[in-house]
Image: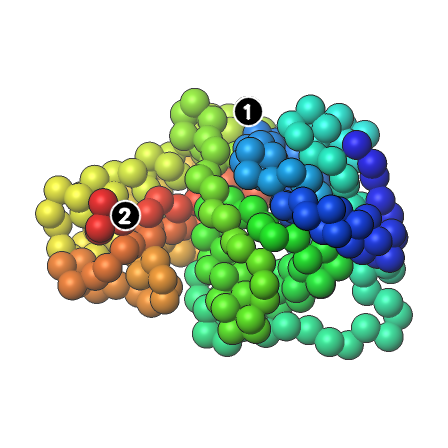
Amino acid sequence: MKIIKKIEQCRGILEDLKKQGLIIGLVPTMGYLHEGHLSLARKARSQCQKVFMTIFVNPVQFGPGEDLEKYPRDLKRDAALAEDNGIDYIFNPEAGEIYKKDHSTYVQVEGLPDMMCGAYRPGHFKGVATVVLKLFNILPAHKAYFGMKDFQQLAIIKKMVKDLDINIGIVECPTVREEDGLALSSRNKYLAPDERKNASIIYRVLKTAQKKILSGKKQAGVIKREALRELQDNNYIKNIDYFDIRDAASLEEIKDIKTAGDIVIATAVTIGQTRLIDNVVINKKK
């Protein structure tokens, strides 16, 4: 496995691989790899002949007061895990390599970033869309792999790819969880032991809401209020940004489940000082 720091070196390697007719996969990450990231790597390895992983803590998607400086970083650890899980190349640039001093161009997907996490993290998804498009231009792979835990992010990237005619396949991969259901996240390391134990309530409440819908309950507002009440009763939850029942394609809020298509139930809560997100999806066609 090779670690690459420069854009032009990355481009040269990928061009040579494409000339050989090889199928190229891309796994974008911010590093501090966990089993969720590694599942993406293995999926890419199973479908592609060469796989690039990007490890880049993107400063543009962090707002004032967020955890950019303390975001966990350990390249040596990440490189070992990546190599063990089928990654051929890691692109690990410095921020100045991605954003030159005169950088002034950003990508804004209209509509989708205005709700859910976007309502509480202004500019976050502009930063996400910008860096993902830059990575797609630097490493124009055949397929790119993203986890469904970041459901809104995934929806925005898919919309950007469609609207801008980007020639890359987006592969959605299921959320990987701990035994108690907590979705894997690099930020889970911030949780104190008691906070970590209580964090399992997030998935439990999501699953309860999912079961209510699958059992035939039609009033999204009632299901939402019941879920919020259960979350609010947990003393370790310091803040609830949202608990939403939305259309899985448009992310529009659902009021009448009877007339809805595929559904995503999504939430963002703060436990202690750590903001965590999660979701479950209901596919009506299945």
**Quadrant assignment for the N terminus:** top right
Residue at 75% in and 59% down: 138
Give whichever of discs 2 and 1 has the lower sequence position: 1
Identify residue for label 1.
193
- 207 w.r.t. 19: above or below: above
192 or 12: nearer the viewer: 12
Furthest-front residue in this view:
20
179 or 155: nearer the viewer: 155
- Find the distance from the CA under tag 2 to the CA under tag 1: 32 Å
Identify residue for label 2.
282
140 or 146: nearer the viewer: 140
Residue 136 shows in the view: yes
| Residue 206 location, quadrant | top left
- 35 w.r.t. 262: above or below: above
The residue type indicated by label 1 comes to Pro
The residue type indicated by label 2 comes to Ile
Left of 100 or right of it: where is 235?
left
